[in-house]
Amino acid sequence: MSTDSKNEMIMKKSDGPAAASTSEQITKAPDGRPPEEQPTWRQDFPIDWPQDHHVARRDFTKFLVLTSFAFVVGQFWIAVQNFIRRRRSKPQMVKIASLAALPVGGAVVFKYPDAHDDCILIRTGEDTLAAFSQKCTHLACAVVPRPELNAFHCPCHAGYFDMSTGRAIAGPPKRPLPRITLKVNGDLIYATGVEVSTL
Amino acid sequence: MRVNWSRSSNESQPSKVFIMPVPEHLNFYIDPNRCIGCQACVQACTECDTHKGESMIHLEYVDRGESVQTVPVVCMHCDQPTCAEVCPADAIKRTEDGVVQSARKPRCIACGNCVIGCPFGVPEINIEQQLMKKCDMCYDRSSVGKKPMCTTVCPSQALFFGTRQEIELLRPRSMPVNEFRFGRQSITTRVSMMVPRQSHEPARYVDVTAAMDERPASRHVSLTVIDDPFAEVQTG
């Protein structure tokens, strides 16, 4: 082993002050023979602190337990976040379009629930309407309706969302577009809420 | 901070960049002759926080039936530590300054092999903690150049921490010996034991097993026996 790689090895073992010491063996075996003549297990279980590079099984187990505990806590955190989001008060009903002014296949862009949240309403059939947030769930580019494919297309990374359900069908996005719940009252179309789902 | 990567400069100047060992010139000397059994060392050791109020120094009676002579027992910090040799869990490590450390907590399985193996009877098992703890020469203190707790309080200086020159100047009639024979096992230690300096032949080592059968020469001690210890003293 070259000196450089040996030093590098010592540097990697960063467990405090003893790490950078000389790696020379100071403890002599009880039989007094030189280290080269000693059985291999002496190298595997050195008495000298600087030569000891082992990770104890107990340390490893501790790492595993703590890591999985952190994952469990994370899952609970997500569940709590979902709960809080559900309990949040619904945004108020907003008039967005008139049914008469929207032909089949036509689309209307609107802001809901805030002035910064772009949404799109599409009349997919004579009796069916679909409204989704326009932000792609991948990196928030604006999605463009493609009625011939029955999909929304995100031009940034070629992501596709199903037009009727909002589900991601191709490309990098994994989560569906947030759906805007609608209510039709006579001729007027109202947005009543946002349904965010992760699947 | 400066790091020497080349081997030659490493050897000429020991890499003192990160390490903080017990200085080589400072050593521990035990002088059992001077021990008065006051337990000050035990108390001082107990006060230390690094081992949670447990004394790592043992004050042993040499032969309780014969004499009141006590001897303080600290870890001798062997060059070939038997405790580490017999440890099946690879828990006892020796830092490069020759100090044998307490068992590594994540590794120690509290099997007690070290307790049985140590020829000086130093390690002890803490059953509650499932851990062997032993004297580590107050590594937190001695590694920064301070004296171990017990040596700072010993009123008769039976426990001494300092240079060899100092101890030879202070104790001209004794000499430090750091080799011990236990039958066929010969152990050299970092801690030295003060033995009487004999003019004809200086002792190179302490033959412990031979000394076990040694009995002190019997001395006639006569005490004045008082007839009636509770007799009232006549006054006036």
Image (tube, rainbow, N blue to C red):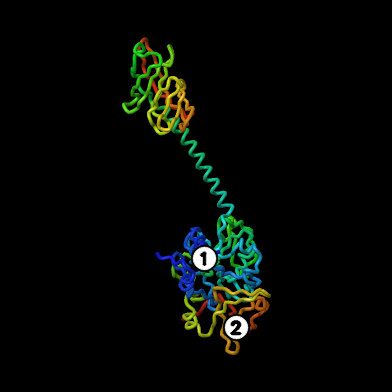
Judging depth in this view, the residue of B3 and B166 nearest the camera is B3
Query: What element does badge 2 sit on?
Result: loop
Query: What amino acid type should be assigned to the residue bearing mark 1?
Result: Thr
Q: Residues within 10 Å of mark 1 (few under 14, many from 20)?
A: few
Quadrant of the image occupied by residue A195: top left
Quadrant of the image occupied by residue B64: bottom right
Query: What amino acid type should be assigned to the residue bearing mark 2?
Result: Ala
Looking at the image, the residue that sits furthest to the left is A115
Q: What x and y, as percent, mark residue A26? A: 56, 70
Q: Chain of mark 1?
A: A
Disc number at residue B203? 2
Looking at the image, the residue that sits furthest to the front is A148
Count of numbered badges drawn on the protein: 2
Q: Is residue A71 above or below residue A160?
A: below
Tell me which residue sits at (37%, 28%) in the image. A142
Query: What element does badge 1 sit on?
Result: helix
Read off the residue under disc 1: A3
Q: What x and y, as percent, mark residue A8? A: 50, 61
